[in-house]
């Protein structure tokens, strides 16, 4: 079972009491009964299982539990035959959090996006690029006791929780390679946040809050799966609480939005606390001392169909991930640099070049004026990621 510490409040330590948000004040007054509120307050789309603390609990006040499993009469539901992979809806990067009664806010989980397709006793797991993820996350492939539906398509994120109950991407990387899985009763947790198909019908055209109600109605208690909690309206307080906990960031989603397969849209937005970027691995150089076998990665991003050099990733390596990287890049050795314009001579000195087939994830301090990542630290290898999809992410103002 997941330790109770995993469920402690995200926003419980958001700040001094004299700066608590309106949502925190309502929670502190101990409201025991959920009372309906005007529609403009936007409370009905929240989950009923608080895990993120006072702000999240107050954000769910006013929900109508009797409507959790109903289908909105004002929205048509498209008939389909069988569930299958649906290209995931993508979010636009923005620079700052905001408050809005028409929006829901969720944690931006530090894991891997996975779509679960259930058709009777057959369960398929898909990455964002429609690659089979079952070999990485075996515990979810069994006939799902966590889902009260014979047919469904669920969108979510697979994470690994450390001993404090916090998402840990390095731990997730270790576990998908089999390290520590046997000794851990719950090596992975699936944070389910959207429902795309239910019992032979597409629900893509339903508004987000309605899809989440349907999802909540079919999820069963299971330590491996959680309904990713949302809070309505108060994105600024939620962001500050996530920042205090050292999380990756938050998601903002228009509660009225349909699901738009394969589209990057302003109706889903991501607000990052720590800048992070996917990068294509194009080469590497040896280091010195303990890092003599691997000192830095030479990376790039695609722009106008060409791979452009974007600098070095020279921090974040451990004994384990350095060995894994060397094993992963060994078959990719190449004689020439893969970048459209070769890197500066100083950066390329003694470089070992690679075919650009591997994508890594890195944290960094920002971009230089000429498009080079600053102080980049390695986080891990992306699974089944198409390198040509890797572009520089720029916050939309």
Image: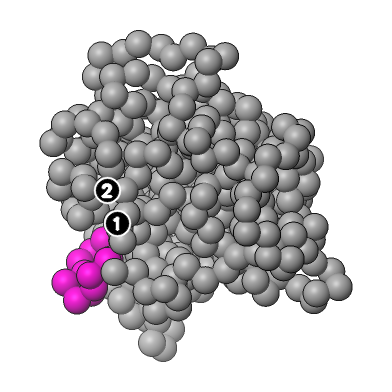
Q: Is residue 202 magenta?
A: no
Q: Position of residue 366 (x, y in %)?
A: 68, 59
Q: Which residue is mark 1?
A: 222
Can residue 180 be seen by looking at this rendering?
Answer: yes
Indicate the position of residue 208 as horizontal and vertical percent values.
Answer: 55, 31
Q: Residue at x 43, y 42 (%)?
A: 216
Looking at the picture, how far across and down is residue 129, in whole percent? 36, 35
Q: Quadrant of the N terminus?
A: bottom left
Q: x, y (%) of residue 19? A: 84, 69
The residue carrying pointer 1 sits among few (fewer than 14), some (14 to 19) or many (20 or more) residues within 10 Å by Cα, namely some
- Residue topped by disc 2: 146
Residue 159, compared with residue 79, is above or below; it is below
Tally of marks: 2
Which quadrant: the C terminus? Answer: top right
Q: Residue at x 62, y 59 (%)?
A: 32
- Mark 2 element type: loop
* Image mark for residue 390: none
N-terminal of the two: label 1 or label 2?
A: 2
Residue 85, quarter of the rendered image: top left
Q: Main secondary structure of the magenta part?
A: loop
Start and end of the magenta stretch?
A: 176-187
Secondary element at image label 1: loop
**Residues under numbered marks 1 and 2 in contact, where contact means CB atoms less than 8 Å apart:** yes
């Amino acid at each position: 079972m997941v330790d109770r510490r995993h469920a402690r409040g995200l926003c419980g330590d958001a700040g001094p009491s004299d700066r608590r948000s309106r949502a925190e004040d309502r929670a502190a007054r101990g409201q025991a009964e959920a009372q309906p509120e005007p529609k403009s307050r936007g409370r009905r789309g929240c989950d009923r299982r608080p895990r993120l603390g006072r702000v999240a609990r107050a954000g769910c006040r006013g929900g109508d539990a009797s409507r959790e499993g109903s289908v909105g009469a004002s929205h048509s539901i498209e008939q389909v035959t069988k569930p299958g992979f649906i290209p995931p809806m993508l979010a636009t990067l923005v620079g700052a959090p905001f408050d809005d009664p028409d929006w829901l806010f969720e944690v931006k989980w530090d894991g891997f996006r996975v779509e679960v397709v259930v058709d009777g006793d057959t369960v398929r797991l898909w990455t964002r690029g429609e690659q089979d993820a079952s070999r990485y996350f075996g515990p979810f492939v069994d006939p799902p006791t966590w889902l009260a539906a014979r047919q469904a398509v669920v969108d979510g994120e697979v994470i690994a929780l450390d001993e404090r109950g916090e998402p840990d991407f390095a731990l997730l990387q270790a576990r998908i390679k089999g390290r520590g899985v046997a000794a851990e009763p719950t090596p992975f947790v699936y944070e389910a946040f959207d429902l795309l198909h239910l019992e032979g019908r597409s629900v893509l055209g339903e508004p987000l809050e309605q899809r989440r109600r349907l999802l909540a109605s079919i999820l069963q208690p299971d330590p491996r799966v959680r309904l990713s909690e949302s809070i309505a309206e108060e994105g600024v307080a939620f962001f500050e609480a996530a920042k205090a906990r050292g999380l990756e960031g938050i998601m903002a989603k228009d509660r009225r939005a349909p699901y738009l397969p394969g589209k990057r849209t302003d109706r889903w937005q991501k607000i990052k606390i720590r800048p992070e970027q996917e990068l294509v691995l194009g080469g590497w150089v040896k280091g010195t001392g303990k890092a003599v076998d691997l000192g830095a990665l030479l990376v790039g991003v695609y722009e106008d169909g060409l791979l452009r050099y974007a600098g070095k990733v020279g921090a974040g390596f451990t004994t384990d991930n350095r060995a894994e990287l060397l094993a992963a890049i060994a078959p990719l050795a190449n004689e020439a640099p893969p970048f459209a314009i070769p890197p500066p001579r100083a950066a390329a000195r003694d470089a070992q070049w690679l075919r650009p087939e591997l994508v890594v994830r890195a944290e960094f301090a920002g971009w230089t004026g000429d498009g080079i990542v600053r102080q980049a630290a390695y986080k891990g290898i992306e699974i089944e990621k198409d390198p040509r999809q890797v572009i520089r992410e720029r916050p939309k103002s």
